[in-house]
Image: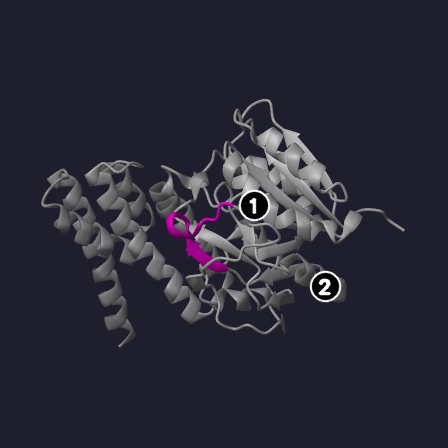
Amino acid sequence: MSDAPLLSVCVPTYQRAGLLRVMLQALMPQAAQFGAQVEVCIADNASTDITEAVVAEAAAAHAAVRVHYLKREQNVGPVRNYVYCATQQATGEYVWALGDDDLLLPGALRRVVEAIRSNRHLDFFYANFAAANFQAHWPESAVGGYGGEITELACSFLQNRHVRYWQELLDSSSSMGTQVYAHIVRRSVWTEFWHARAIAPDYRSLESTYPHTCMLIDKAWDKPAYYLGAPHLVQFNGRAGWADGNGTRIALVSLPQFVSRLDDRGLGLHALIRARGYLKDAVMDGFRNAVSGRGGPDAGEVMALSLAMGDRYPEMLEALLIAIQETGGHVVPEVVDVVRDALSRLQHQQSGGAATAA
């Protein structure tokens, strides 16, 4: 009989020892209940703070937990770090990747382990989650699990259930399955998908922004899954450090690719409309950030990225024109004309198609 763990909890981290300490306070006592059945894999992306000492302290306090700690000699970027953690550092049958600022709720790990044990024939599990505000609600300690205030629930359906097709989960009120911490996946799915697959520079593609989502769209589509309805962890809004300074580029490069991938796969109309609504919001927010100097791509790059996908998603061009008008002329007029011409061309094509059909 294999002595490999049932579950690997993977925690990529970089330079956030204070957050990691609280996260491990919530995780480690729960993991200790399962001995060798649950391992904790921490991928340290070359931190120079006291991360190593924090991990050593947590491991010493919970000697029953199998801890695999790897400190890289140089930073390889957040995406490569956690793909490596899931595919090479982890040894469990299943992988649950958590952020160093995701706090388990009491009893969460037991519910996950029990669900896996009862459904070993399945490759995919989805765990409901909750949200709170980092500034207002992040605790100084969370021994055994987070016990503070919750401001939002990702999905209001709280009963466990089998799902015939994984993509049915994308109809929930969460953000279309992009949260890595919501997914527990058989490790062989991770390794098969990422074997010999190159990862582009961070945030330049869907694969290098949401590698788990890219993998799931490819591997989990039309496959059965299990939904765990009770919230299992709390994620804290206002602390997505892995994307700092890259939010606009993510929204205008990776998000359109994500929606396009869902569209090609035949996602249901209701969920697809909601996904395309994210594109419109992303363009407007990205352009506002650019002209106000809040970081990310400049206004020219925002427009170029929007134009690149405008033929397929005209709502991106509509949003761009609205945002340009709001700025009061902070962009080159010739570029505005390009956007208007592109949108006019699309509208003409659409009206011509309608006339032909009539």
Q: Would residue 137 be counted in the magenta stretch?
A: yes
Rounded to the nearest whole Å, what is the CA distance between mark 2 and mark 1? Answer: 22 Å
Left or right of residue 353: residue 153: right
The answer to whether 270 is drawn above or below residue 12 in the figure is below
Residue 236: x, y in percent? 45, 51
Magenta segment boundaries in residue numbering = 130-140
Residue 256: x, y in percent? 39, 51
Amino acid type at mark 2: Glu
Q: Which residue is mark 2?
A: 114
Nearest the viewer among 124 and 103 is 103
The answer to whether 222 is drawn above or below residue 344 in the figure is below
As drawn, the residue found furthest toward the right would be 1
Residue 149: x, y in percent? 45, 59
Is residue 292 visible in this depiction of the protein? yes
Q: Which residue is mark 1?
A: 23
Could you tell me which secondary element the residue under label 2 belongs to?
A: helix
Q: Would residue 213 be counted in the magenta stretch?
A: no
Could you tell me which secondary element the residue under label 1 belongs to?
A: helix
